[in-house]
Image (spheres, rainbow, N blue to C red):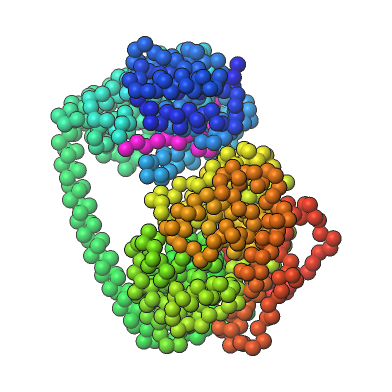
Amino acid sequence: MPRFSVIVPVYRVQAYLAECLDSVLSQSYTDLELIAVDDRSPDACGAILDEYAARDARVRPVHLPENQGLGGARNAGMELARGDYLVFLDSDDTLTPDALRAVADRIKATGEPDVLVYDYARTFWTGRAERNKVARYLAEDGPAPFRLADRPDLLRVLMVAWNKAYRREFVAEHGFAFPPGYYEDTPWTYPVLMTAGTIATLDRVCVHYRQRRQGSILTTTGRAHFDIFDQYDRVFAFLAERPELDRWRPVLFRRMTDHLSTVFTRRGRLPRGSRADFLRRARAHSRRYRAEGAPVRWRTRLRHGLVHHGLHRTYGALQLTRSAGRRTVKAAVKSARGLRSALLQLHYRVQLRLPLRADRAVFAAYWNRGHGCNPGALEEAFRSHAPHIRTAWIARPEHQDTVPPGPRRIRPGTFGYWTALARSKYLVNNVNFDRRLRKRPGQVFVQTQHGTPLKHMGLDLQEHPAAGAGMDFEELLRGVDKWDYLLSANRHTTSVWERVYPGGYTTLEYGYPRNDVFQHATSADVTRIRESLGVPEGSVALLYAPTHRDYRRTQRPVLDLERIVRRLGPRFVVLARAHYWHGGPLSAGARVIDVSGHPNVESLCLASDALITDYSSIMFDYANLDRPIVVHTEDWDAYHAARGTYFDLRSAPPGAVARSEDELIDIFADGHWQGSRSAQLRAAFRERFCRYDDGHAAERVVRHVVLGETPGLPEVVPLAERHPVPSAASARAHPPLATVPQPSGHPPVTETH
């Protein structure tokens, strides 16, 4: 007997079926049978199932002689199921990697519950994914298993069959089966949850719920949506036969009313001429099954009144009134925004006439995303080496929590924001400030940049329309004209910056301040960060940080991270970091940890034992740690053609080069990633690009720009004399003989650098 019987009803999904089946058969948990039921599909689905069955004995195809609909196909699959647990999956959806292993582990940990409820994410044809908005109800804290009465809010989770695992003996004991119709999940899910003696939750996305542009049953227009009334009749008939469940009647009445109103108000479901009829039947159901006791949220009271009273024309009139009201409010808001903008600019002009504050400095990074990068390290250095300067940090509201204690927090677009830009002597950013900034005589703008250029930048993008589309190069140069200082980490960067950003600024080839932490962090910092990220003790952590692809409309993952860790074995984990333009996650699983939302990339570098990247400038920073780097260059030709590069990375890499995913796996499997050849390549790369990143870059900048100490700046520590903190794996292999004291004046790394 297998642990799981995965039941997949199949009908007219030949474009998606292979992906669905592969997602099941490639699970790391292999104790399963896949019962795929061909519901008399008129396309090639039946043949596809037979092909899979010929290749994998776990596939059990069923070919129904007549089309029975989704419920009938599921019932046919259940009749043949032998697994301990039933798992339903629609044939255009997919299981996420390692989903069944997580489900099996949770079932075991919670004592074999009757039902386990897990999470899902909607996936759109654009490539966007969106997690279930009420995932909080799947939290695993608290006692488990439990009964529905202990956590009734579980009924707010989407009432479908495919986000749960069911103990087969429990289903058979109570004779649960799917009825025919469009809304067959309704009279299945409610009775199952109300009857279950033990329930548990798994707070993990296990299903990717495909949102098809066309062809989805629920988005099809037709009178078939009237089926919802028959399904709720079945639900309440089930209750009527079981008086012990009568306490759920008010809750189900409210859920039914919500559901009916959703079908009525959702555009595209009901055909013209049928809406009044639908509302009449909804009113009849509301009066037939009405039960007091379940509170109704104020936002849905109008819709409940619509159903209860059958107010078709009234609802239409209210919709028109609300629409007109929204237009009026929108116009008023637009007018108010215009007035506020004018007042802000008037305020700014007044502030420009007031004296500069020589003891003020304002910082920002990455278009006001939060505290970090070179400006973040400089802000801390201002407070350490020039404590008479009062610092402020500009961050959008959602990033305010990344700002550490010390600097004053400022939100962009406020009166305080424009005051700071007008009157602070020092302006520090790794991009440009608001284009409306008027740089005053006496103000000092330090442009830190945010990486060493491999890809073409600035004016060079004029030759690459895919990458430079929409860029205003005249505006770019107007921004450059405001710079007083431009930071550089090496000779290569200096020559590129001065050519692609031509201006009258002074280049400070002092190293990048954000990399100082690599020379000052300790092994205790590494251990603490790894623990905070959930990296298992004794594992090898690979940081995967790809860059943006200009030639792609959607930034789909280049590497299959779940496959990589499966091939490499349990010793390896991946810290997956999406490019900041996209957010995350790249992937998620037991040994793939999504760190896309982590505020500090330097901490992620410290936590890892090696870096996997492609063409991201993170490789130049990471090389300062003198840890292994593996470069994945599978799409080099396309990237080079679309973006342009300043040198061929394949001929001068910082470590091993993988031209395919399989090569990448082999590099780690055979140890080449940390071999002598990789070390030689890294040493040459560090000599070329890391000469000034010795841990004192921020200090040199502050002493030069603020204190005017051009002579007497800290000497650059030669590469051979630097001792960056070792990785966790290296520390285990070569434990230190003695503790090396850290330079004074440098606090240990923190999560908010």
* Stretch of the chain drawn in magenta: 198-213
> Considering only vertical position in the picture, is 688 above or below 508?
above
Rendered location of residue 191, percent (x, y): 43, 21
- State which quarter of the image contains the N terminus: top right
- Residue placed most toward the observer, 351 or 286: 351
Rendered location of residue 7, percent (x, y): 47, 21
In-image side of 490 versus 351 (left or right): right
Q: Name which residue lies at 59% across and 60% down.
A: 651
Rendered location of residue 127, percent (x, y): 41, 44
Q: Name which residue lies at 42% across and 69% down.
A: 460
- Quadrant of residue 64 in the image? top left
> Considering only vertical position in the picture, is 488 above or below 630?
below
- Quadrant of residue 702 in the image? bottom right
- State which quarter of the image contains the C terminus: bottom right
**In magenta segment, residue 329:** no
Instruction: Assign the magenta stretch its main secondary structure.
Output: strand
> Considering only vertical position in the picture, is 723 above or below 554?
below
